[in-house]
Image (cartoon, rainbow, N blue to C red):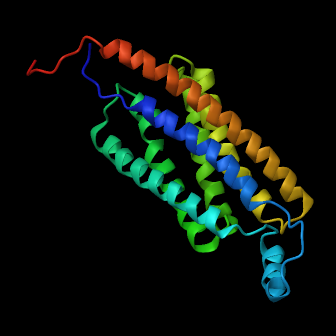
Amino acid sequence: MALFMDPLDIFLMILGATLLSTAYTVWLTTRPINEDPPAEQATVARSEVASRGTVECPATIKTLSFYYMSIGVFALVTGIWGLATWPLPSSYNIVLMDPWPLFGAAALIIGLALYFTGSLYTVSIPLAFLGIIPIVYGVDIIKYHLTTEPSLAAALYILTGLAPLLSPLVYMTNGRSVGRYMGYIVMVILILAGLIAYIIGVGAAFEHTAGWVKWTPWYG
């Protein structure tokens, strides 16, 4: 058995957790205002509705920002390691390892945006452009029949890219009904992608454990 270090199982499960968490984040940052704010906050609230159409939940949003920043640092560091070492066989390094630091950078962007602004309004456009990249990799996986489940893996990549690609329609529509409906669509996409990531990641964890169960290091 070739000595390849394969951390993809934990990467996929972390991705699944983050995609599902992002579905919750989209819901949290696109909720319409259902009640009038206190009089002293009315002017600020009206300004927020004009720009984002959302209810601010500072404590919850700030807590989520720490999650994204932590995951972003982890994915960025391990992704840079993967770019430098190419730990996987052949072209799998390109389609499986290269996008991982991009995911880390996107998570950091989201975390910082939530921390400083409480919204994804300001970053929806750059995230949309980043979303094109995993879609390209998903098509690449299908074209070259990579992984044991190329259709499932490609679906994960395409859905993961489609969610940020649609995000401007959610956050740039100033709270209109189209933004809320697009928010629901994006949440469904994120949930489907998160479940696929978990399915592939859990399967990979058991497969990798079985494959390495008899391996011992050189020192015994």
Relative side of 207 to 45, left or right? left
Location of residue 38 in the rendering, given as x and y in whole percent from the top left corner: 84, 82
* Relative to 196, residue 186 above or below: below
Relative side of 126 to 178, left or right? left
Relative depth, front residue between 177 and 55: 55
Give the residue drawn at x 81%, y 79%.
45
* Relative to 21, residue 207 above or below: above
The quarter of the image holding the C terminus is: top left
Question: Do we see residue 146 in this rendering?
Answer: no
- In which quarter of the view is residue 52 placed? bottom right
Location of residue 78 in the rendering, given as x and y in whole percent from the top left corner: 36, 45
Location of residue 136 in the rendering, given as x and y in whole percent from the top left corner: 59, 39
Give the residue drawn at x 51%, y 60%.
66
Give the residue drawn at x 82%, y 87%.
43
Question: Do we see residue 3 in this rendering?
Answer: yes
Give the residue drawn at x 62%, y 49%.
131
